[in-house]
Image (cartoon, rainbow, N blue to C red):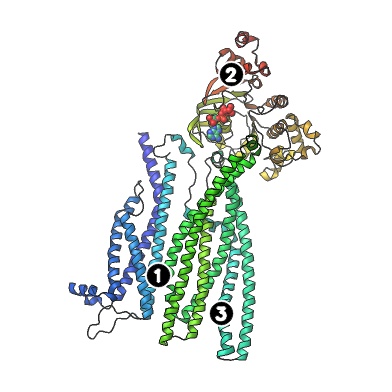
Amino acid sequence: MALNGGRESMGSDRRQIILTPVMRTATGLWLTWTIKLSITTFTALYPLRGSLWRLQRFADIAELYSLAGSNLDVWLLSVAHVLVLAALLSRVTSPYRRFSGLVIPPPYSKMSHGVYWSCTLFELLLLGKAVVVAVLGEEQLLPPHPGDQPASRGDVGLLCMYVCVIVALLCSFMEGWLGQRIITQRRKQHEAADEVSGGGSSQQPLLGGKGKVAQETDSATIPALIKLSAPDSHILFLAFTAGAAAALGQALIPYYTGKIIDYASIDPEPHAFRITTLKMLGMALGCAIFTGIRGGLFTVAMTRLNVRLRQQLFASLMAQDAGFFDTTKTGEITSRLSADTTTVSDQICLNLNVMLRSATQAAMVLAFMFTASWRLTVVTFVMIPLVIAICKVYGAFYRRMSKKVQTELAEANSVAEEALSTMTTVKAHAAEDSTMTAYAFKLHRFYLLQRREAIAYGLYMTTNTFLAAAVVAAVLFYGGSLVLKGAMSAGSLVSFMLFQQSLSSAFQSLGDVFSALSAAVGAADKVIELMRRRPAVEESGTLVPTTFAGKVTLQDVSFYYPARPTLRVLSGMSLVVNPGEIVALVGPSGGGKSSIVKLVERFYLPDEGRVLIDDRPVAEYDRKWLKQRVALVSQEPVLYARSIRRNILYGLEEEDGLPAAELPTQEDVEQAAGLANAHDFICALPEGYETECGEKGVQLSGGQKQRIAIARALVRRPAILLLDEATSALDADSEAVVQEALDRTMKSRTVLVIAHRLSTVQDAHRIIVVQHGQVAEQGSHDQLLEAGGVYASLVRRQLARGPSTNRLLPSASSASFTGGLL
Ligand SMILES: Nc1ncnc2c1ncn2[C@@H]1O[C@H](COP(=O)(O)OP(=O)(O)OP(=O)(O)O)[C@@H](O)[C@H]1O
């Protein structure tokens, strides 16, 4: 019963997740589609408005369609509308119906896809017709009946039709975009729903708790970028204003040029000539000043956005869980942080700058063009839908490619970084050649992708350039005929051509901006996705108790690492470490000892069971507060390139947000170093506590590093100390010194110690043997030897290995066991 209820609620949750945003987009899609249909219908019927009353008999309709030539468009439009109707029906019956189900089909069936493209084609033809009619100035729809006036739409009618067709086309593009958005949304939400429910056929129901990554759709990138730029809106506003002013000036300069030529030659007026020249000079100066202001402000905005992007991305990375870093390569992350953030901020600001300039220039020039000859302007626009369509297709392709290129580059970077950061290992294994081959292979893949991108760019440029020339030829042809008919002066045609050139250069740079912006948005997709990733281990709670005893409890804990979801590392593990108790975790390698420590540290969340500290779940504690009371010393201490003092104080400095009263003093640092057997060697160094440790602490020995790490743990005065093989990487002498420090520090705290060398833990209050993710046995050293189980065989094996472990010889009470061992 309960199971069924659970399933139902999971199903409805899943449906909820799939439906909500998709339905919103689908409503937009339908609205757009309805507007388009109404407008297209109106546009198709408009030419027939004076003739429809005549279509009273079937024969009249037949007569209307029987006229080839001039009524071809009516034919085409009729077919288009039948198809539109079919599309309407197919859409009513398929996608909407299926939005409500869990099965996610593609948004359009094959048939409705065909219908969609046919309609778009006919809409383009309709546009062509509108332009031809605009050029000819009149239209003959039906053979004139005796006494009929020839049907003509007139200028207003033509303009109305032209506007309608443009709106219909915009609706088409909008529709295509929304359709694509639905596909993306549904795919991503379906994936998210799968993660929430543990995935359809998943064998690991426990993974559900880890699927908390917020998947953002690509379409969320632009709003996210706008939001990120919002704090700079005042700078951007000023830059835009300066840019608009500069563009206005630039558009006026050709106007003044024409005037000056008029005043100097065709219609000489010396005074007006001088004044206009001065005006033009003033305009040029103003234009230059505004251009400078615009450029400077955009650069400032660009840098501010870059800094903000990096900070927010870094903050998001800092908040990620350990599982994220297990599965993501460092090179990839640093590539996002450096190359991608720079691409995003630089490209976006730079291209916004160019886009603003070109768009303003285009708008101004268009206004002049319409004033000069609106018919010629309409002809110029014949090809615009085609150019837009090419841009759209190319933009989508380019964006996909640029995302792949970024990924490939990040992978190449991570190969290089992995090798460079482990150079000694590479050299020790003479693996230079294979490393270079791996790097070359990644670079080759990057090159292949770039080559494809270059070919696409070449094709795009060819088409774009040809279209620009074709528009010029069409205008010259039509303008020339107008001049031949005496309907336009040669001078007006020349000035119109100059405007057109200016317009085409504006459109050209808009096209370039478009592709560059596509690349930037491709890079931004990844940055934003990373910035919005919600860690599986969420921020901590707020519990700050006044007393803290230091009890550690694991209750029936089962755990899988996110990077290896098929391997159960801990299964039903339960243990209690009482306050002040020293408990050693021992056992065969891979048994799960370090994983227990990682769960107590809350690097990961258990899939089942609970991890408690002082009988409260770890998640309830304030993270910073807890990290001052639970300290970890691991096998390989990590020191940073800063002074020894600052390394000991790591995480306890003013910048870490601690109240001044809680900041450790120099005395605390020295006391902790003393306890850790580090004070003497630190004082012997020329600069004492201010000695630099070097990158990753390279300037210190392994034993020294480990003692500083112990001091770092002790300066927190932790109630719980976690020691994960703290001495295993050291030589015998260092080990002895560090072990002595550890023995001293273990007193009066709860200690969970993992050790391979059993001699170091035989005095522990309790020894727990962990095997296959479970407690195999527990007790004191002597008790476990007596029991003769896993621990006894581990001891036997270590004794067999050498004399350094003969401290392990059992006490008098286990004399019989000694015989067995020797
Ligand atoms: N970050 C990780 N991602 C995936 N699997 C991991 C990760 N860390 C450890 N494991 C796997 O989990 C299992 C338990 O590892 P754990 O480090 O807890 O064992 P251990 O008992 O501490 O071993 P050792 O004594 O060798 O340190 C091993 O099989 C290991 O391969």
Residue 812, above or below 286:
above
Residue 733, above or below 264:
above
Front position in the image: 793 or 499: 499
On whether ligand 1 comes within 8 Å of the CB at mark 3, the answer is no
- Percent from the top left, x then y, of residue 363? 50, 73
At label 2, the amino acid type is Leu
In the image, is 367 to the left or to the right of 686?
left
At label 3, the amino acid type is Pro
- Percent from the top left, x then y, of residue 331? 59, 45
Residue 549, above or below 197:
above
In the image, is 124 to the left or to the right of 758?
left
Which tag is nearer the camera, tag 2 or tag 3?
3
Residue at image coords 41%, 36%: 202
Mark 1–mark 2 Cα distance, whole angstroms, equals: 82 Å
Residue at image coords 44%, 63%: 390
Residue that mark 1 sits on: 166
> Which of the two discs, 2 and 3, labels the residue nearer the N terminus?
3
Residue that mark 2 sits on: 794
In the image, is 249 to the left or to the right of 188?
right
Residue that mark 3 sits on: 254
At label 1, the amino acid type is Ile
